[in-house]
Structure formats: structure tokens, C-alpha cells
Amino acid sequence: MATQRKKAAKKAKKEPRLAPDPYKLNPWFLVRNSKVHGKGCFARKDIPKGTRISEYVGDRITWAESDKRYEGYDVNDNHTFLFIVDRKTVIDGGVGGNDARYINHSCAENCESTVEKGRVYIDAIKDIKKGEELGYDYQIGRDKNDPPNVDEIYACRCGAPKCRGTMLWPAKRPKPKKKKKVAKKAAKKAGKKAGKKAAKKAGKKAGKKAKKAAKKRSAR
């Protein structure tokens, strides 16, 4: 009996979790206004940990297409439905997407996004009570071309006790590499070389003078 249970458990683990039909009314959540940002998704009923809540769908495009599509878009507006799948593909939830696009960022996430075979799913990582807002960590990557006020644009207002204050990751802007130290090292190295050359040159001159002086003495 125990062996049969173990086999059943192993089989259950191997079977992929199925998400509800992304284009039908989601049985797990509903969309309404959120205190965090605009619209949000709230549990219709208790959602057990491990539930595959939804698939994130929309127009699947390349990075180049997404750049072209939102060219001239206000950089100070953080409202976006673009979800990065991999280095080639981006899902634009704003075009042909479903309600999963309204799940807000949260530093105290109760969900997580998972990419499997090029498809994006939202899974519950803890038990979620009825009426609770769903949220996962967006972890929007920083870029060298980010505007100076990028932290202001992507400020987080989830209200979690340990809110890191931003939807970006890493949380703090990486400090630029200090070039001064490199310059100092180069100058120090150059100085040493110059010093050695000068000393060598001075040594040669001194040697020549000493030889001349010795010759004069011997001539006397």
C-alpha cells in the first residue's frame, strides 16, 4: 500500500501542472482596482500553494519589434505589459493578452513567474487567502542606457514591511568602476619606469665622467 502511494506521488510530480485556459474567465482570480497600482488581480477563493494560476499570454515578438513598437514611448511611464521570455522573444501582454497582465509587482510575493519551453506561467508559492492580491517580483533588469531617474520611474509601492523600494534588480544601481585607481596605477607604473630610466641614464653619465676623470689622472 505504502509502495503504491510512493509510486502515485512520483507520477504526480512528473505530470506537468496545467494552467487554466488563458482565454477564458480565470477560476482563481478576478481583476479590480488596486491600491498598489492601477488594476490588480485578487483571489476569488483560497488558492493552495503550488497552484498554476495562469499562463501569461500575448503577442510574441522579437526584442527589435518591441523596441520599434514602443519607439517614442514616454520613458517616465513604467506601465508596460512586456514580458521577457529569453534573448530572442518578448511577450506583449497588451496585444492579445489576458488578465494575467494585471498581476502587480510585490516585494512580498505570493506568486512567481516560471518559463517552461518558451511559455510563461504564474504559480502560487504560498497559500493565498480569498480576497488577497496576487503579486510576484518583476525583477526588471537594469541597463546601462537607463535614464538617471530610472529608480523614480520604477519605484515600488507594494507596501510590504520589507519593500526594497524598487521593481528593479539589483535593488541598488551598481556603482561605476573607479577609473581613478587604474589611472593612479598606470601613473605609478609609468613613474617607476621613468625613474628607472633616469637612474640608468644618470648612472651611465656618472660612469662616463668617472672614466674621463680616471684617464686625466693617469695622464698626469
Image: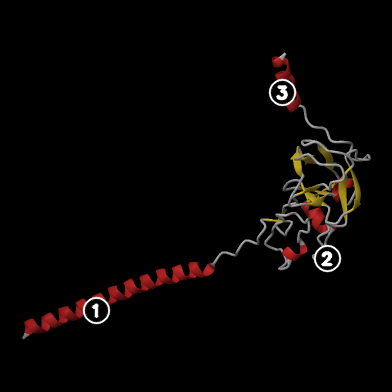
Of the numbered discs 3 and 1, the one sitting upstream in the chain is 3
- What distance separates the C-alpha of mark 3 from that of mark 2? 50 Å
- Whether residues under marks 1 and 2 lie with C-beta atoms below 8 angstroms apart, the answer is no
Q: Label 1 sits on what residue type? A: Lys
User: Within 10 angstroms of label 1, few (less than 14), some, or many (20 or more) residues?
Assistant: few
Disc 3 versus disc 1: nearer the observer: 3
Name the residue nearer the viewer: 109 or 17.
109
97 with respect to 182 (left or right): right
Residue 133, percent from left and from top: 84, 48
SS for dot 3? helix
Residue ID at (73%, 67%): 149
Q: Which residue is mark 3?
A: 10
Q: Which mark is residue 205?
A: 1
- Whether residues under marks 3 and 1 lie with C-beta atoms below 8 angstroms apart, the answer is no
User: Compared with residue 140, is residue 8 higher up or lower down, i.e. above or below?
Assistant: above
Name the residue nearer the viewer: 147 or 165.
165
Q: Which residue is mark 2?
A: 74
Residue 145, percent from left and from top: 70, 63
SS for dot 2? loop
Q: Is residue 158 visible?
A: yes
Of the numbered discs 1 and 2, the one sitting upstream in the chain is 2
